[in-house]
Amino acid sequence: MELSTRPSPFIDVIWGRQAMNRLAAAVEILVVAALAVDVALTFTSTLLRYVLRHDLPWAPDASSILISVITFLGAPAFFRRSRSLAYTALLDHLHGLARDAMEAIGLWTVIAVCAVALGAYPAFLGVQLHQTLPVLEISNLYKAIWLGIGLILLALFALERLARLAGNGGVMLGLVVAMAVAAAMAALQYGYAHAGLELEPFWTIAPVLVLAFLAGTPIPIILALGGTVYFIITGDAPLVAVPSGLQYGVASFILLAIPFFMIAGALMEISGMAKRLIDMVQDWVGHWTGGLLIAEVVATYIFSGISGSKAADMATIGAVMKTPVRRRGYPASEFAAVLCASAAMSETVPPSLAMLILGSVTSLSISALFVAGIIPAVVLALALIVAVVLRSRRRGWTGGAPFRWSRALGGIPGSIPALGVPVIVIGGIVGGVASPTESGSLAVVYGLVAAWKGLRAAGAGPFYAAMRDAALTAGMVLLMVAAANVLAQAVMVDGLGTAIGSALGSEHSRFGFLALSMAALIVIGILLEGFPAVLIAAPIFLPAATHIGIDPLQFGILLIMATGIGVMMPPAGIGFYIACTVGDAPMNPTMRASVTYNFCLLIGLAIVAAVPALTLWLPHLLGLH
């Protein structure tokens, strides 16, 4: 959702709108350039190692600097351009002073978190100044400086948004509420430090996080807020843990695969390759009963292996299939309900970003996760197809155009290039040729070559816009990972994760544990976007599952499936509202249509949980654990 551009004399006088636009454009160019350089560097290093058996030893050091640029500059630029990765359902239903005040609370929260992190930043930077990158042997300052710049930009863009609200008292009312919350936190700090308060800190922090969530605060800021408030009120760790946690949260080389996969998916979309792939699927199954809806499920399965992103899946498939579905008389609500449920299924189709994130915060092999998710995703897809057929027969929805061999076979050649992306990624990783990040760079270069004709036809403008959107979205996702590291440190210091894990581990029945944990994970997915749900849940639930004898690889896939279903489940799942927006569908009818599809997803989840071989057979066959 794009930001409002309503006039504000305050912005014109204080900030200078043109100056802010130029600043944001410069930041975006720098992020795109950093990502382009990193793709070229990673691809070159991979190619040299494969051909000459000698890579670029300094490439990881350079990539650690570039990922800081992508994360800490990309996220503020994303924040200025979009309201995605935030819960806005309540804001969208409010009007006037109430809406402005609520939005102001969220923006003051962003500024407060940035202010606290910036206050501790000089101490953090002082430590980084005297440390060096291992191969380049230059100061860590070159990597750490971008965090400080990003925090300043994030606060500046939040102030710019506040300026847009100036005029009816909403900004001041929001500030009053924010200051009241700060005063309550100060009282709690005194209670923990001097009055012997023994209440679990996260019980007192939870209402603050809920308020920030309802106020439309970006999810990464909410995660950082949880850890920041914990450290403030308990004093269990110095506040330098906040900037330190943010910086080291994106220290893993694996995380670079996230922007690489996003760019590969964007190339497929803008070049028209994704449309040809979806058209091919319609040619083969569109004539069945409910055929266009079945094609929607199958296309989501296939395309998710190219994009790796639920939002990209829904946007691309929705744009391509919305018109033919409506021409055949399917309700918009049904189309959106299937789109939403299919996106939940796609979370386990490799290369899934959720799998990359899960692998980065646990000891699970990303190669094994990629392979293990293939059959469980098929189970969910079949469950959805059964639901489509049953609902279509009951409502008399016929298939699409009659099947013709010439048309079906003729669509295959045009779709083959798009299928090369998952083949390269999964084949490279499973075959031991390249790491996930290196495979991502190979996929980007392949995408550029395969889509060159389509990209030339599209022109430089759309190409740059697609690259920019992919880079900025990746920056915000990476900031979410970084912020989750701050919260994870607080949870670890507090012992909350251990306590929850022990409580779950006390359920000795494998069936009982799986039922409780899947229900809890679905609720977590409903309340949070998928990535933070994985980041928060994995360190808590995975050790408990392993303790009672559940294979960690199987439980990792179940965790991704359950949180993915939760994200798409109405009435609170964020993905449900995205699907309604993409499908131009009314929410209430879509919610009713979603009941059947969600029920079938839950049956599929139960089948995968009850039959471990569905998850473990293929990775074990390939020697992956």
Image (cartoon, rainbow, N blue to C red):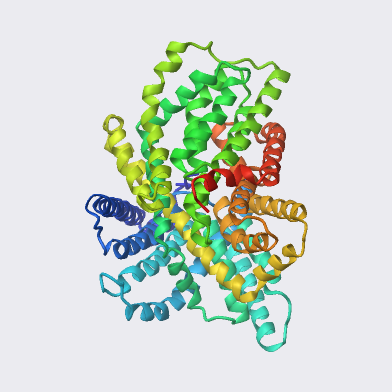
Q: Is residue 442 left or right of residue 164?
A: left
Can I make out residue 215 in this image?
A: no
Residue 372 position (above or below residue 172): above
Residue 174 position (above or below residue 338): below
Q: Nearer the viewer, residue 489 or 385?
A: 385
Residue farthest bottom in this picture: 194
Residue 161 position (above or below residue 414): below
- Residue at screen point 62% across, 42% down: 614
| Horizontal and vertical percent position of residue 554 | 61, 51
Residue farthest left in this picture: 52
| Horizontal and vertical percent position of residue 506 | 76, 65
- Residue at screen point 47% across, 39% down: 305
Can I make out residue 467 in this image?
A: yes
Q: Nearer the viewer, residue 624 or 336?
A: 624
| Horizontal and vertical percent position of residue 501 | 69, 65
* Count of marks overlaid on the render: 0
| Horizontal and vertical percent position of residue 140 | 33, 73
Q: Is residue 459 left or right of residue 316?
A: left
| Corner quadrant of residue 544 | bottom right
Residue 547 position (above or below residue 95): below
Q: Nearer the viewer, residue 78 or 592?
A: 592
Q: Nearer the viewer, residue 615 or 277?
A: 615
